[in-house]
Amino acid sequence: MAKNIIRIGKKEKKYVEEVLATQFSASKGINMLGRLEKEFSKKFGIQYSIGHTNGTATLHSALYAAGVRAGDEVIVPPLTMSATTMAVLHADAVPVFADVDEDTFQIDPKSIKKLITPKTKAIITVALYGLSPEMDEIMDIAKKNKIKVIEDDAQCFLGTYKGKMVGAIGDLSSFSFQGSKHMTAGEGGMVCTNDGDMADAVRKFSVLGYAGVSAKVGKITKDDIQNPNYERHVSMGYNYRMSELCAAVSLGQLERLEELVDRRIAVAKLFTEAIGDCSWLKPQKTPEYSKNSYWAFAVRLTHPKISWVEFRKKFMEFGGDGIYATWKLTYLEPMFKNWNLSGKEKVIEKTYDGKLQNFTEGLCPVAEKIQKEILAFKTNYWDWNRAKKQAEILKKTIKFYDKR
């Protein structure tokens, strides 16, 4: 039997205590963020890693480094948490929604190809539920059209695609350390890239445009700030730098990352076995050349006589912890339906000469279809017996409907 796991353990607490012992004095030179960034780069095989306050700030910085500016178009999937699109709006850019694959739930390269215009500056892919999109096709499309690819890997840690680490394939990648993710500090995130110029741009953009920071340098020096003639800000930037406390917890989590990811994969295996040969629950398809890190175990409910709500209710009646729905498609959220984008709608209107994009039903038919079907079971069970019980309850729920 698999052992139980502690979500936050001794390593995380040790590093937090090291930070607290400094009384937050920069002169102590502990630089926990620098340590985290160095080790994160090693773990993922990437040259540059730059810590951020959260996984939306990371995307905003990545978009800036990719050269996205006001009025540019960025292709995104609608089937994901809306923060991916919000980051595009933060950058004063225009989101263009590509449809998804019915089996993998990932952004569809064929749909991307149809949407590229002279205004397209970047593509954001999302490794939804822990699985990589078809990155070879997407990178080929991007290269031919001279546009950048940003991986949103908030839900995928240590996943692989054709032998390559997810997060080391696109021009830039973004990770989130929010509480539900594979590794967490409660909040936080990381931008990664192998391009030194883009890494410099990410750092400056995320640290107030300071002259003295760079890809490998996260803070300006005391000598700089004690000089009355020092010109601090070479460009406009945001205050997105990760705190030392978040960096401390993140470093402890990073050192345990294989254990944390392996647990989710093991739980997903339990659910897979529980489904067995059930024909009307269809798990997210993982191609043989990919490793799914299973942020969640997602399946499509395709039974014509069982509603999504009904299935979840019965699962919970049998003792299940609940089932998550996938997100409402971003362009069908009230902010788009009511055209309330906090002023960003003016950028879109200007870009399209007053003609609005058709952010209505029918825009991405495959995504619209499967969004209503997806059941997402949590995989972050640190108590193994509890995980096994949930899988047994799923099996019981399936049997209940098969007998009807």
Image: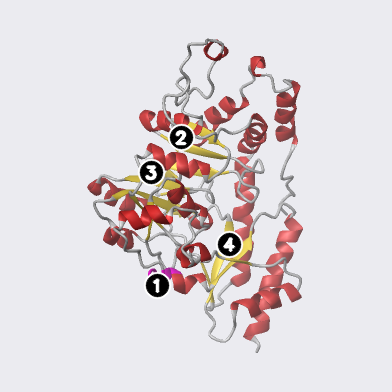
Q: CA distance from mark 1 to mark 3?
A: 27 Å
Whether label 1 touches label 2, CB < 8 Å: no
Q: Earlier in the sequence, mark 4 or mark 1?
A: 4
The amino acid type of the residue labelled 1 equals Pro
Q: Nearer the viewer, mark 3 or mark 2?
A: 3
Q: Earlier in the sequence, mark 4 or mark 3?
A: 3
The label number, if any, that marks residue 347 in the structure image: none
Q: CA distance from mark 3 to mark 2?
A: 13 Å
Identify the residue under disc 3: 170
Identify the residue under disc 2: 45
Q: Is residue 92 left or right of residue 270?
A: left
Q: CA distance from mark 4 to mark 3?
A: 25 Å
Residue 224 percent location from the top left of the image:
52, 13
Q: Earlier in the sequence, mark 1 or mark 2?
A: 2
**Rendering quarter of residue 393:** bottom right
Instruction: Identify whether 351 is placed above or below 68.
Output: below
The amino acid type of the residue labelled 2 equals Gly
Q: Is residue 398 visible?
A: no
Identify the residue under disc 1: 365
Q: Nearer the viewer, mark 1 or mark 3?
A: 1
Instruction: Identify whether 252 is placed above or below 228.
Output: below
Residue 61 percent location from the top left of the image:
45, 39
Q: Earlier in the sequence, mark 2 or mark 4?
A: 2
Q: Is residue 106 left or right of residue 184?
A: left
Q: Is residue 332 left or right of residue 387?
A: left
Identify the residue under disc 4: 297
Looking at the rendering, the stretch of residues picked out in magenta corresponds to 360-367
Whether label 4 touches label 3, CB < 8 Å: no
